[in-house]
Image (tube, grey):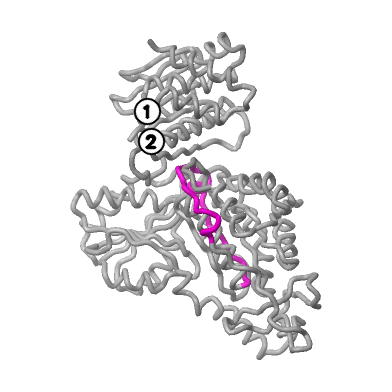
Amino acid sequence: MQQIRLCGSGGQGVITAAIILAEAAIMEGKESVQSQSYGPEARGGASKAEVIISEEFIYHPKVVTPDVVLALTQQAADKYSADLCDNGVLVIDEDLVPDSPEHPNVIKVPLTRLAVEGLGKDLFTNIVSLGLLVKVTGVVSFETIQKSVAKRVPPATIEKNMQALRIGFDALA
Amino acid sequence: MSQARLMQGNEACAEGAMAAGVNFFGGYPITPSTEIAEIMAKELPALGGTFIQMEDEIAGIAVVLGAALAGRKALTATSGPGFSLKQELIGYGCIAEIPLVIANVQRMGPATGQPTSPAQGDVMQARWGTHGDHPMIALSPWTVRESFDVAVMAVNYAERFRTPVIILLDEVVGHMREKVVLPKAEDIEIYPRRKPNCTREEGYKPYTPMADLVPNPADFGTGHHIHVTGLIHDETGFPTGSSKVTEDTIQRLHQKISRVQDEITHYDEFFMEDAEYAVLTYGGTARTAYAAVKMARQQGIKVGMVRLMTIWPFADKVIKKVAQKVKKILVPEMNYGQLVLEVERAAAGQAAVISLPKYNTEIFTPKEICTAIEELATEVVK
């Protein structure tokens, strides 16, 4: 079982990214549960999305001990990474999380900056992050996540989203 | 339709309702039920159905009552604050015997409470929210797939018994997404709208009960005069002050449901064969309870689990049997302790009933429930 948490601020697209990841897992024949919590605000406020991927039916639907936490804001990193296990991985946007929480395995990537530089918009940050998450976890193949992204995003944006995935995937050697 | 896909509980509820023939939705959006309205708004017009967003939750159920009387299979969806507003007209549906389904995706209350947080605080409101004596059917799913099945069942029960039926979802199941394979359309049983079985000349009266104690009032616009009222009425549908008719009506409304109680009591049992303790659970909490029971089993504790899908009418017989079998029953709920009161009543002292309430916006963790099970197994029964 893999427990993955994506968090940031409302509007950064972490819930969409989590849905795409869960759909990719189902494409590979796995079981998957995706959930989220968010505040009453439409934009801003802490936003947390979770994905559990397993070979067996998943009963408890929330992450108990995350294997990976991806944090796109300082507030989210501080609030949602404390329960990471020691051999887990914390992935942060190094520009937006200047003060990294203490953890033995922190991967720092300027995710938002990569989206802006590579695609001209921070809108693609969540898909860049998804590419990176697939590289870090190996929980689904790169081909499957490509298919899953293509299924979810507006057709006119598929090409740019594929680029975003690649940028994220290649961000880590 | 039968392919595996990722689906949200609310989405499955909407799809199930449509699969069962719902072609009218009236309501007013509210978190965490909004996706149901959204899907209905998107899909119903294309199917020749009707979606109306009304000015508030009361109008949202009023229009559904009207649509149902005019022959539509009708649904409204809401959450706690809206559910409170709809209560008066739920009672109207009970006495006027109008088939309708209310999906209530529970969130933390009272009042606006914690609008985006999960809870199971409307268990008693579902039963007793509207005034006066009336039976109630409320079904609570624990998986996304079951949200679909429960929606189909709710629509069918509403039609068959001509009564409001409540789908008691919670934010956990309503908002989570998981893998589902939905049944094929041809495998879904649909209960058709009841129709008058004779003409006026042959003695048709809209509220004459049939053998199953349910009347067959004609839909508006099908050639019959029909009078609908929230007052106690006789077989003609017109009000009466008669004590006898009043007594008979209240009794019949109860009996039309109580006579089929066993049939409509749906529940699952897990690990109960050798159980000395039981966890009695429902809705989203049941998923965590299952994980906890498995953890406790690994420690050698003989604990089982009973999961109720039918919340109302309450599964007295099921609980009596469980209480005769086990020493203690643990009832975890995302509220201050509601269904536990019914469990206590039905257990009638045969087993100790222990409440495990939670009301802080967080759902249970498996460890929390497992710890409570460990305590059950170590404490001596007083």
Q: Secondary structure at mark 2?
A: strand
**Callout 1 amino acid:** Val
Instruction: Report the side of B375 relative to B143 (left or right).
Output: left
Number of other residues with Cα within 10 Å of mark 1, as a class: few under 14, some 14 to 19, many 20 or more: some
Which residue is rendered at x = 27% and y = 50% of the image? B294
Query: Magenta stretch containing residue B181, yes or no?
Result: yes
What residue sits 43% from the left and 66% below the top?
Answer: B341
Q: Which residues are magenta?
A: B162-188
User: What secondary structure is found at the residue carrying circle 1?
Assistant: loop
**Dots 1 and 2: beta carbons under 8 Å?**
yes
Q: Which residue is mark 1?
A: A139
Instruction: Report x, y in % for residue B87.
Output: 65, 63
Q: Is residue B137 left or right of residue B232?
A: left
Cα separation between marks 1 and 2: 8 Å
Q: Position of residue A85 (x, y in %)?
A: 31, 28
Residue B353: say if magenta: no
**Mark positioned earlier in the residue sequence (1 or 2):** 2
Instruction: Using the image as rendered, state which of residue A155 and residue B242 is in the foreground.
Output: A155
Q: Read off the residue under disc 2.
A: A53
Q: Position of residue A113 (x, y in %)?
A: 54, 11
- Residue B272 vs B174, above or below: the answer is below
In the image, is residue A138 above or below residue B184?
above
